[in-house]
Image (cartoon, helix red, strand yellow):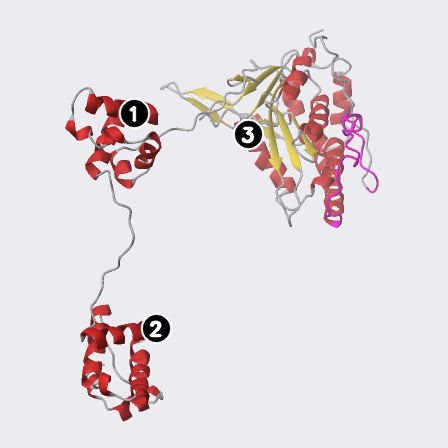
Amino acid sequence: MQNAERLSLTEMREFVAGSRALQWTAPGRAAIYEFLRRVLEAQQYAGLRKAEKGVVRLFLGKLTGLSRAQLARLIGQWVRSGRIALRPAQRHRFPSRYTRQDIALLAAVDTAHEGLSGPAVRHILQREYRVFGKAEFQRLAGISASHLYNLRRAGAYRRQRVVMQHTRARQVPIGERRQPDPHGQPGYLRVDTVHQGHHDGQPGLYHLNSVDTVTQWQVVGATETISERHLLPVLEAILHQFPFRILGFHCDNGAEFLNYTVARLLNQLLAEFTKSRPYRTTDNALVEGKNGAVIRKHLGYGPLAAGQAAALQKFYTAWFNPYLNYHRPCGFASVEITARGQRKRRYRPDDYRTPYEKLLSLSHWEQFLKPGVTAALLDAQASRHSDTQAARQMQRAKATVLTRCQQQRHYRPLSPPGGTRPLSGELMQGKRAAAPLPRTPIPRFTQLPKKGESQQQ
C-alpha cells in the first residue's frame, strides 16, 4: 500500500468495513515491520483512545495478515522501544564437540582400515594420539564407540566416504545351475508357473506349464497355490501325462520347485535337476515363450479364483493337453552356422509340425516311451479327431469351464476344511469334467516307479 500511514481513522474504519481497495506490496518481513512502524508513528498510537487503537489494530491486521497475538507483540515492542526489530530465528542446539575436520579425519581412518568396527576404530584413534603423538587426533581420542557410529551417519562423513555393498545371493544346494543338454532325446522338461493374479481381493489360481525341450510336448496343470500341499499332486499328474520317461527337470530359481520335496520326487524318477543361471535369460526361454503363446492366449488375464483350480485341471487333462500335443503345430528352428561362427535360427515352412509328429521323427523314438505306452496307443489318440475338430471341441469345453468359473467367482478351497491333503489320484488319473463337457477317452500312462526302481528297465 502506498501512503497508507497518511489515512485518517475514519478512512481506516471504512477500509476495515471491507469496501475500499488498496494496493499493498511487501517483499518480506522487514518491509512489513517498517510499514507497521510508520503507521504507528503517523497515527501517534500511544496517545489514542482504546476504541481508536482497536481501529488501527484491525486495519493493520487486515492489511498485513498478521495474527492478533503477533500484532500485539509487535505493537508492544514499538511502545517500549520505539522501533520494531527483526529478530533472527533462535533454535536450541547442542554444542558441537567434533568439527568437520574431525569427521573428515575419521572418514580417512575408516577408508584406510576398510571400515573396522566402532571399538576397533576407537582404539586406533587413541593410539594415534597417545602412542604416536599426533595432535589432530586429540578430540577423536576421547570419542565413545556409540558416538563414533553417530558421526558415521553425519552428512559430512557421507560426503567423504560412501560404502556400497551389493546384495549377496543366497545359495540353495538344490539342483545344478546349468543349461540342460538333452542330446536330441525327449524327456528333458522346462517347467514354470503362471499366476492368474488377484481380482477383487481374491487370490487367483496358478498354471503349471511344462514343455519338453526336444519335441515341445507340453502339459499344463492348474493348482490352487504353489505350496507343497497343492502343487505336488498337480506336478505328479503332469509328469504322468508325458508318454516318455522323464530324464531332466529344469526350472528357474523359484522356491516352488527348489525344495527338498520336489527333489525327492525327481530322485525317484532318476531325473537330473537343473536350474537357470544368473543373467542367462535363455536358459528357460522355451517355457517362458509358451506361457504367453499358449496359456495367456487361451486363458487370458481375467479373474480365475483359486477354488476353480480343480475344474480347470480336469479341462487341461481331458481336452487342452491332447489338443496341444496332437493337433497344434509348433515351430522347430533349423540352426545354421554362419561364416563368423554365429548360430542362426531359421523357421522354414517345412519346420512346423505337432509335438507328436516331432516325436515320431526321432530315431528309435519308441525306446524312450514309458512301460505300457505303445505306438498304437499314441496313434489312436492322434487320429481320433482332425486338427480343426479337436480345436473346436477344446474351445467348447473351454467356454463351458470359463463360464462356470465366472458364475462361481467366490473362493472355494480345493481341500476340505479338516486340513487333509488333496488326493493326487483323482488328478493323476485324468478324470474328465462333469457334464455339460463332452466326454472322450484319454490315454492313461503308467504310474511313477517305486523308490529305488530305475526307469531304464
Labels 3 & 2 near each other (Cβ < 8 A) = no
Q: Nearer the viewer, mark 1 or mark 3?
A: 1
Where residue 113 sits: x, y (%)? 27, 22
Callout 1 secondary element: helix
Q: Residues within 10 Å of mark 2 (few under 14, many from 20)?
A: few
The secondary structure that dominates the magenta segment is loop
**Real-space Cα separation, disc 1 to disc 3, in angstroms:** 71 Å
Please check the rendered image and state whether residue 272 is part of the magenta-colored stretch, yes or no: no
Task: Give the quadrant of residue 250.
Answer: top right
Q: Which residue is mark 3?
A: 349
- Choose the circle earlier in sequence order: 1 or 3: 1
Part of the protein shown in magenta: 407-436
Where residue 440 sits: x, y (%)? 81, 32
Task: Give the quadrant of residue 322.
Answer: top right
> In the drawing, does residue 220 fall left or right of residue 111?
right
Where residue 293 sits: x, y (%)? 58, 36
Q: Which residue is mark 2?
A: 69
Q: What's the amino acid at mark 1?
A: Val
Q: What's the amino acid at mark 2?
A: Ala
Please check the rendered image and state whether residue 411 is part of the magenta-colored stretch, yes or no: yes
Q: Is residue 453 above or below residue 51?
A: above
- Choose the circle earlier in sequence order: 1 or 2: 2
- Choose the circle earlier in sequence order: 3 or 2: 2
Q: What's the amino acid at mark 3?
A: Pro
Q: Which residue is mark 1?
A: 121
**Real-space Cα separation, disc 1 to disc 2, in angstroms:** 53 Å
Instruction: Inspect this view and state whether residue 108 appears.
Output: yes
Which label number is shown at residue 330? none
Labels 1 & 3 near each other (Cβ < 8 A) = no
